[in-house]
Amino acid sequence: MDRHQAMATFVRVVETGSFSAAARLLRVGQPAVSKSVAALEERLGVRLLVRSTRRLQPTDAGQAYYERAVRALAEADEAEVAARGLGRGLEGRLRVCAPVTFARLHIAPKLGAFFARYPKLALDFVMDDRSIDLLSENIDVALRLGALPDSSLSARRLASTARVVVASPGYLEARGAPKRPVDLLQYDAIVYSQAVGGDEWRFRKGTSETSVRVPSRLNVSAAEGVREAVLAGLGLAIVSRWMMAPELGSGAVVPVLQDWSLPDIDLWAVFPEGRLPSARARAFVDWCSDAIER
């Protein structure tokens, strides 16, 4: 039995909670995964997994083995990188997730430069506005916008951008522009229903702060839907300057309430809890930081 492969297989089973999910991530059949774990338990002479509420859970011995296996696999990865030399020697497959609109506008068009720098790396790019579970989805690094609800996550702040309230020129021509945050109560609001959105809009002007719970005529779960609804003239929305960069530049959308500011939004690189970031993940984050700064 390949000890390194058996260790990696066991780690995936613990993180996904099932043989079948681990098999999908490893691109092997489920029997191979079950056989690998069984052989590992036989070699160690101890039970590593038990089934609880339809999910595989590690025993005490399994949890201790898992924690050390994660570190050992990370160290092995680092050892290979050191032996080959940094930079163009990086190879393998990297799984990254990011919000759809941000990734479409600011990451995906620039990936050619990333592949040129690291020609031996392959990328699984998961684009999703939801805050997905990094361990169960086998994500190496996630790009996330807004405050991080879990302070235990290993994360690096990459950048920050302003947010603005926008509408289409046609909508403002028909309804007029709001002068004060309280005026928003008389307008149609397009609300982004993910964690970084919501119907409570907070404003600041000098030392004055105010918040307005807007009447949300339309709630949208994806930023792409917010963009399209604003462009269709359905109402006002809060957007980051990243999210509407092309339209703000062309005048296809117009910012309002510019005397008032909204809290900035941060971009984070987030790594799975309990895992050391791999050299591949760190290289991607460094590249992202440079690309966004440029």
Image: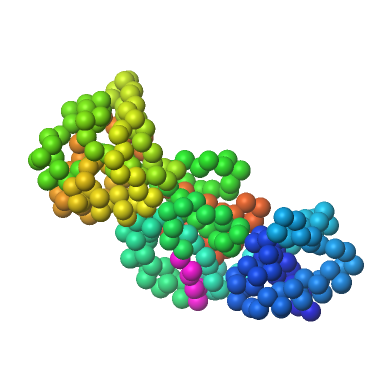
Q: Is residue 100 visible?
A: yes
- Magenta span: predominant SS is strand
Query: Residue reaching furthest left?
Result: 173
In this view of the protein, which residue sits in the foreground, 121 or 43?
Answer: 43
Residue depicted at x 10% and y 40%? 174
Left or right of 219, for residue 126:
right
Left or right of 111, for residue 277:
right
Left or right of 130, for residue 189:
left
Quadrant of the image occupied by residue 112: bottom left
Quadrant of the image occupied by residue 161: top left
Residue depicted at x 50% and y 76%? 120
Q: Position of residue 126 (x, y in %)?
A: 46, 63
Query: Residue reaching furthest right?
Result: 45
Q: Position of residue 263 (x, y in %)?
A: 36, 35
Residue depicted at x 38% and y 39%? 198
Q: Is residue 121 magenta?
A: yes
Q: Is residue 174 magenta?
A: no
Q: Is residue 8 visible?
A: no
In this view of the protein, which residue sits in the foreground, 289 or 228?
Answer: 228
Quadrant of the image occupied by residue 207: top left
User: Up-down: is 4 above or below 273?
Assistant: below
The quarter of the picture where the N terminus appears is bottom right
Left or right of 156, for residue 64:
right
Residue depicted at x 41% and y 73%? 116
What kind of colouring is applied to the model shown? Answer: rainbow
Q: Which residues are magenta?
A: 120-125
The quarter of the picture where the C terminus appears is bottom left
User: Up-down: is 99 above or below 114?
Assistant: above
